[in-house]
Every structure is written in C-alpha cells, then in structure tokens.
Image (cartoon, grey):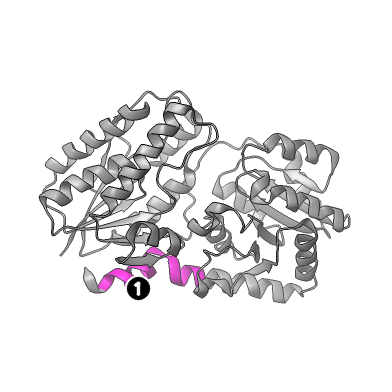
Amino acid sequence: MKSILFLGYNVTDECVDKLISIDTLPALQTIKLSRGLYEIFNRDPISLSCFTVVPIQDFPIGKKLYVKGNFGAGVNTKGVSFINVLCLKQISRFFSILFHYVNLKSRPDFVFIHGCDLSLISSVFVLKLLFPNVHVQVVLTDMASLPLASDGLIRRCLKIFSSKLTKLLLKRFDSCVSLSRDLGEYYFSGKRIISLPGVVVPGDNSVNKMELSIDSNVFNHLYSSSGKHKILYAGTIIKSYGVESLIESLDFLDDSFVIYFFGKGPDLDYLKAVAKKDSRVVYGGFLNKAQLDLFIENVDVLVNCRSSNLEFSKLSFPSKLLEYSLSGKPVITSRIETIPDELAGYFLYFNDQTALEIANEIKRFFKLSEVEREMVGAKLKDFVVNTYSPSAIFDRYYNSNV
C-alpha cells in the first residue's frame, strides 16, 4: 500500500459558503478541480493524507486577515493556517505546511500538488531535499504568479520574483499533470508530462452554495420562451473572452434567438447595459452549479467563444468545457489549441471568433434535427465521464504504479 500526500484546495462546503461572502472573485473552479484531484487517490488500498489551503485573494480584497486551518474536507485532511497579506501569506503557509509534515504518521511515497503556489512548492521542495526518493508530481493549471492589470508595482515585482523562483524549484520535481502540453513543457521539459484537461465528478453540486440572488423575471423569460432558439454562456464576463463577439452575433440573427449569460467579471456593466436595450440578451446573475443546471436543462446549446489568439490560450484549458460536457447538451466552442485530440471530435466549432462566424455556426447548429442535437450532447457527456472521471484517470495513469 502506497502513502500519498495531496496538497491542494479541498475545502469544506462551509468554507466555500464563507469564501463566497468575503471574496469578490471566489476561486470556485480551483476548489472544484481540487476535489476531483483528491478523489483520484481517495480509494483503497491507498493511504491518502491531504493538506488543504483556502484559495482567497489577499486582504483587503479577500476580507479575511487571518485564515485558520479548520476547513479541510475529507479523511486525514489538515487545513493550512496563514496570514492573508502579500509575503506573509506565503511565509505563514510555508511554515504551517512544514508543521503538518512533522506530524505525519509516515513519510509519503508520492506527493501530488495542485498548482504552482510558491508556499506549496517551496515546502515540498524541502521535503524532497530530505527524502530524495519521494516522487513529486505537480498539477499545472496556469503559469505561476501571473501579474494582473490591477496589481500595483510592489505586487507585480513580487510576482515576477515568485514566478522565477517557482520555475527553479520545480526543476527538482519528477513529473506533472498539465492542462496543456505547452505549459507542461515549459516547466517539465524532458520529464513525464500527463496532458489532462481536468477532472469531472458527475453529480457533484456541493460547491458554491450561495443563496439564489436572481430576478424571477429571468426564470419567467426562460420558461415562457417556447419556440425560441436558446443559447447559454456561463463564465467570466469579459469582452476578450468572446463575450462582445457573441453579443454582436445577434446582429446577424433574427428575433427567434436569445442568449443567456451567467457569471461575473470586469465587463459586467457593459453586458447589463446591452441587456437593457436588447431583449435577446439576458443576464441571469452568478449562480451555483445546481441553479445553473436548471437553465441548462432548458436551453438548446452551450457556447465557449474565448479567442484562440489570446496569449494564454496555448497554456490553459477552459474549465467550462468539461462542466458544459456533463450537462449532456451540445457545445460549440472556438478552436482552442489545448483541446486534446481525443476530445476534439465531440465538440462543434466556430471557425473564427468574429460575430458573423459565430452567427453562421449557430445557424448551422439549429439546422440539425432535434435528435441529431441530442446525440451530439449525449456522446460528448459519455466520453467525458468515461475518460476524465477520477476512477477513469486513476485506472489510466496510476493504477499500475500504486
């Protein structure tokens, strides 16, 4: 029996509820992915331990100065306490993780890290120095310490330093799971790279339990729109992710088409302004998965129109594609390079991200019969569940080594 240590963001439902209320952009997708990663190894005969961190933005954006380590979900899980301010965040997490190392009942044979947070990486680096035979595998979702437009000079400089140090430390580790091949090659060139777009846990509605805060008119609009061609976009509301082009595609579509938008982001005011002027654009708010599923069940197609020309498109896979896939609805997406070849044939595609092409593909889709549309969605769901569920991933990549 192998002993495995997982470092990630597998927090409790109560912690998720709290995070939603204190963080302007709660990292719900990060938590969902961590829960899926945890489930890969949560099986007999593995001895699994977990160190869990709350993915919260720095104080005061994240309205919590000190985070206590009493939020871990799962058996043998320890929460990591930390001070939620710039460098103190990384330093306090680092020592909290080291404290948990000391109290482990046995040395792990395999360490599995979700993401490139410097505190997690540096603490495992210490463990690797002490026990070189421990196999360390990192799950890469994005580049380490990406600067944001809202970052000040000090924060930006710290992120540049953190990025360089993280890349240096990662050279000591053994392998990676990467959401894109290029991202894996950047950090783990010459080592084992598992390309994996994500993990799906069918039926998991546990994350994001916030109360419904949506105008009932949106529900009424959905259920009263019989005969309409209903399209749904859920994700970050930002023009560069194709939201603007998707809205402008209505210029080439008649009044039988309606697009429902869900999420939040920097261009939310723009979306709301358009929705006030055009009844074919409906903003439904920021919903949890169970609530969003109510809408998804009653629309015809789901869309992802993120531009494939964005610099980071080669280095990340949009998590919404796998979430969409679980619904059993057809999905139309832009041709993002990071879509795995084995999955690519199950999507429908926009040839480019212009408003005209988006409109043309939507028209082509609705020329399919209802039976043909249902088959597209059903085949996509079956493939994703059978390929990217925790048990499928374990059997495919780890069963022979554990």
Q: Nearer the viewer, residue 20 or 306?
A: 306
Please name the residue that numbered disc 1 is placed on: 396
Magenta highlight on residue 137: no
Can you give x and y, in whole percent of width and height, for residue 76 in the image?
Answer: 22, 47
Determine the residue positioned at 62% across, 57% down.
309
Q: Magenta region: which residues?
A: 383-399
Left or right: 340, with 376 as reference point:
left
Residue type at mark 1?
Arg
Label 1's element? helix
| Residue 276, image quadrant | top right
Q: Is residue 349 above or below residue 246?
A: below
Can you give x and y, in whole percent of width and height, for residue 238 in the image?
Answer: 65, 43
Determine the residue positioned at 26% across, 30% down.
92
Dominant SS of magenta comes to helix
The N terminus sits in image quarter: bottom left
The C terminus sits in image quarter: bottom left
